[in-house]
Amino acid sequence: MTDILPVEVDERLERLAAAALWADAEDAPLVVRRLADPPRERTWTVLATPGREGVVFASIGAGGSGHVDLIAVDPAARGRGIGRALVGAAEEWMRAHGAVEARFAGNPPCYAWPGIDVRYTPAACLAESLGYERYRVAWNMTADLPARYDEAEHEADLAKLAAAGVTVAAAPVGNRGRVAAFVREQWNDKWAWEAEQATGLHYAFRDGEILGFAAWGARPLWFGPMGTAEAARGLGVGRVLLRRCLDDQAAAGQTSAQIGWVGPLRFYSRAVGARAERVFWLYRRALD
């Protein structure tokens, strides 16, 4: 097998990802660019065959975990052992950087997918043939755009917020420090980074105090993350912010939005008619 070597990210890798990842062909080049611009403190690499028939993005996460963030093999080059060689090279790199476990799983806050989409059967077969165990299931929901929701309910939500003295606004790029600080204090650094990096960011506040936020485009074309402070729950903050983000995405030309790594199915189903659609298997194995 040809050597697997570190490479620079370029348009050839974007085209390779689009060709190999048929279920994500539209946004695969954007995902490649996203993975190539992670948080400054992240340790990561890109390894590929000399002819760019295959590529793997790998990174180091928390707790000694190494992550296969993206793997793609040109459809015309499959069956030659390239995928196996790429994973082997990624694992060797992980060991050299202190990882004790390898995962086919997203490494937030800068990730491509939660895990292996079940439709990418060859990737799941590869992971299992290499001794990876399936340890978790994650899913996305899909919201058609323009978003479908009850206009009367939405107006009632807006009236309720106004009566409670709550204002909603967009936070432009370059002016998100206060919102990011709120997200970091209420949740974690990962969500705060996503809020700062997002294409669109909306938030709710009262008397100068931020109460909730929602973002889209931190992972290209997807919605999330979002959250409402405990003291403001029950006012409809989340529904209003969600719909503002989806309106942005529709205005940007999207006909649907993926709500990534979903927890509350019922909330999104009721708020915008979203449906559970994409399922991901997360894999891991100990590195000897």
Image (cartoon, rainbow, N blue to C red):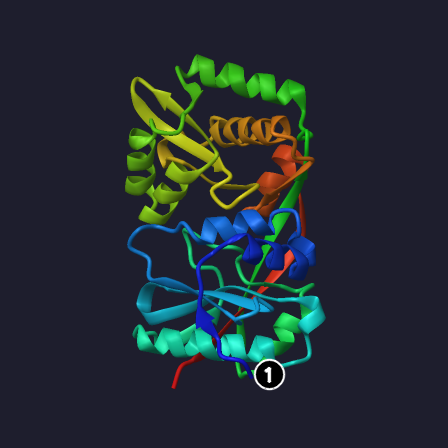
Q: Nearer the viewer, residue 265 or 131?
A: 131
Would you say residue 104 is visible in this rendering? yes
The N terminus, quarter of image: bottom right
Rendering coords of residue 54 (x, y %): 58, 69
Q: Where the C terminus falls, by quadrant?
A: bottom left
User: Within the image, what quadrant is residue 80 found in?
Assistant: bottom right
Give the answer, above or below, for where 84 lies relative to 147: below
**Res 260 visible:** no
Where is mark 1, residue-wise? 129
**Residue 95 placement, left or right of 254:** left
Residue at x 32%, y 77% (from the top left corner): 96
Q: What element does badge 1 sit on?
A: helix
**Quadrant of the image occupied by residue 72:** bottom right
Mark 1 is surrounded, within 10 Å at the Cα level, by few (under 14), some (14 to 19) or many (20 or more) other residues, namely few
Q: Name the residue rendered at 50%, 41% in the picture.
A: 224
Against 77, is 258 above or below? above
Asked whether 171 or 155 is in front, the reply is 171
Query: Measured from the top left, where is residue 233 in percent x and y?
Result: 43, 32
Picture coordinates of residue 141, whole percent (x, y): 63, 47
Q: In the image, is residue 214 above or below residue 172?
A: below
Judged left or right of residue 72, residue 47 is: left
User: Which residue corresponds to the image point at 53% horizontal and 83% vertical from the top-left?
Assistant: 131
Query: Please, what is the three-letter code of the amino acid marked with disc 1?
Result: Ser
Q: Nearer the viewer, residue 47 or 165?
A: 47
Q: Is residue 64 left or right of residue 200?
A: left
Tell me the quarter of the picture where residue 178 sits: top left
| Residue at image location 29% in from the left, 20% down from the top | 208
Q: Position of residue 152 (x, y in %)?
A: 65, 18
